[in-house]
Amino acid sequence: MAEGNILDRVLKDIGDVQCRLFDHRPFVQGETKFILREFEEKRKEREVQQMFEMLEMVTEIKETQIEKAVKLGDMHLCNLTGHFEVALRMCTNIVEREESDKKRNIWNKDESKERKSG
């Protein structure tokens, strides 16, 4: 019976050695959990930092840039409106001249036909 007991312990030790040498699941699971935890913590911190930076930028824009944009708009939109009105009048004049030239050309053609036939 002592031989069976010794043989059982040897077989158990061989099994333990084999598990330690070839079964990497506990090690891989531990490393995976460590990497996942590190990634989530670092990513979370980075995302929180980015959110604070965006909040600062939005607050700065709200406090300074909106008023500045409104003032610049008030100053320059009047000029822009005036320039558009001038451009519109110029375009209208060009269209009117073109129409009068077309009428004149049609009238001249009709007049020359009457002279030839008459």
Image (cartoon, grey):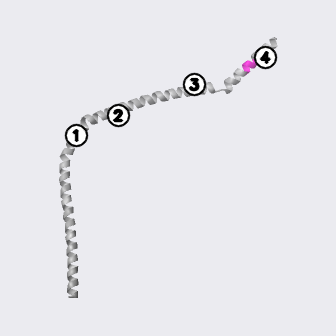
The reply to whether discs 2 and 3 touch (Cβ–Cβ < 8 Å) is no
Q: What residue did someone put label 1 on?
A: 68
Q: What residue did someone put label 3 on?
A: 30
Q: Residues within 10 Å of mark 1 (few under 14, many from 20)?
A: few
Residue at horizontal 60 percent and vertical 25 percent from the top: 27
Specify the segment rendered in magenta.
10-14
Quote the CA–CA distance across marks 2 and 4. 69 Å
Q: Which amino acid does label 3 sit on?
A: Gly
Q: Is residue 90 above or below residue 40?
A: below
Where is residue 23 shown, x and y percent of the image?
Answer: 66, 26
Quadrant position of residue 42: top left
Question: Can residue 28 be found in the magenta stretch?
Answer: no
Sequence-wise first label, 2 or 1: 2
- What secondary structure is marked by label 3? helix
Q: What residue did someone put label 2 on?
A: 54
Q: What residue type is labelled 2?
A: Met
Where is residue 35 shown, x and y percent of the image?
Answer: 53, 28
Query: Depth-wise, is mark 1 or mark 4 nearer the camera?
Result: 1
Q: What residue type is labelled 4?
A: Leu
Where is residue 112 shown, x and y percent of the image?
Answer: 21, 83
Q: Which amino acid does label 1 sit on?
A: Lys
Quote the CA–CA distance across marks 2 and 3. 36 Å
Q: What residue did someone put label 4 on?
A: 7
The reply to whether discs 1 and 4 touch (Cβ–Cβ < 8 Å) is no
**Quarter of the image with the N terminus in it:** top right
Quote the CA–CA distance across marks 3 and 4. 33 Å
Quote the CA–CA distance across marks 1 and 4. 89 Å
The reply to whether discs 1 and 3 touch (Cβ–Cβ < 8 Å) is no
- What secondary structure is marked by label 4? helix
Sequence-wise first label, 2 or 4: 4
Sequence-wise first label, 1 or 3: 3
The reply to whether discs 3 and 4 touch (Cβ–Cβ < 8 Å) is no
